[in-house]
Image: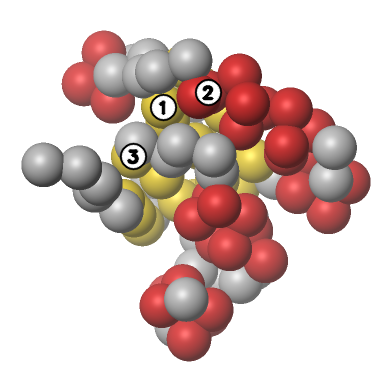
């Protein structure tokens, strides 16, 4: 994944994953060394992502899943990096 090929862009940074879906990009960002990742997902998929991430101790403390539209949420800290993988039409 592009995230893993560009670890220096993520190391020690706060990342927002817009339209996180299952949280796979969020997990890549955490694995690449992000200080914290906010996985923002508006659909019910947010609960699935929350369960996947909670089940993995390597990610559970560094990824926060937020159910909502990115334009409606407020993050507790400033983000350094924004990632997204748009799907669909």
- Label 3 sits on a secondary structure element that is strand
Question: Residue at the location (20% across, 42% down)?
Answer: 88
- Please state if 61 lies on the left or on the right of 37 as rendered: right
Q: Is residue 78 visible?
A: no
Q: Quadrant of residue 80?
A: bottom left
| Image location (x, y in percent) of residue 68 | 38, 15
**N-term mark: 3 or 2:** 3
Q: Which residue is mark 2?
A: 46
Check residue 86 in the rendering and tell me which mark sits there, or answer none.
none
| Image location (x, y in percent) of residue 36 | 60, 47
| Image location (x, y in percent) of residue 42 | 36, 19
**N-term mark: 1 or 3:** 3
Up the image or down, 70 lies above or below 28; here it is above
Q: Which class describes the residues within 10 Å of circle 1: few (<14), some (14-19), or many (20+)? A: many
- Please state if 53 lies on the left or on the right of 4 as rendered: right
Q: Quadrant of residue 23?
A: top right
Tag 2 near tag 1, CB within 8 Å: yes
- Label 1 sits on a secondary structure element that is strand
Distance between the Cα atoms at labels 3 and 2?
A: 11 Å
Distance between the Cα atoms at labels 1 and 3?
A: 7 Å
Q: Which class describes the residues within 10 Å of circle 3: few (<14), some (14-19), or many (20+)? A: many
- Please state if 87 lies on the left or on the right of 56 as rendered: left
Check residue 18 in the rendering and tell me which mark sits there, or answer none.
3
Q: Which residue is mark 1?
A: 41
Tag 1 near tag 3, CB within 8 Å: no
Q: Which class describes the residues within 10 Å of circle 2: few (<14), some (14-19), or many (20+)? A: many
**N-term mark: 2 or 1:** 1
- Going by the picture, which residue comes out furthest to the bottom? 5
Q: State the quadrant of the C terminus.
A: top left
Q: Nearer the viewer, residue 23 or 6?
A: 23
Q: Nearer the viewer, residue 85 or 38?
A: 85
């Amino acid at each position: 994944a592009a995230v893993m090929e560009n670890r220096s862009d993520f190391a020690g940074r706060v990342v927002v994953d817009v339209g996180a879906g299952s949280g796979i990009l969020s997990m890549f960002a955490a694995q690449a060394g992000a200080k914290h990742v906010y996985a923002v997902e508006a659909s019910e998929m947010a609960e699935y992502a929350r369960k996947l991430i909670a089940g993995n101790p390597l990610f559970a403390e560094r990824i926060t899943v937020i159910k909502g539209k990115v334009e409606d949420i407020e993050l507790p800290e400033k983000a350094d990096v924004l990632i997204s993988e748009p799907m669909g039409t």
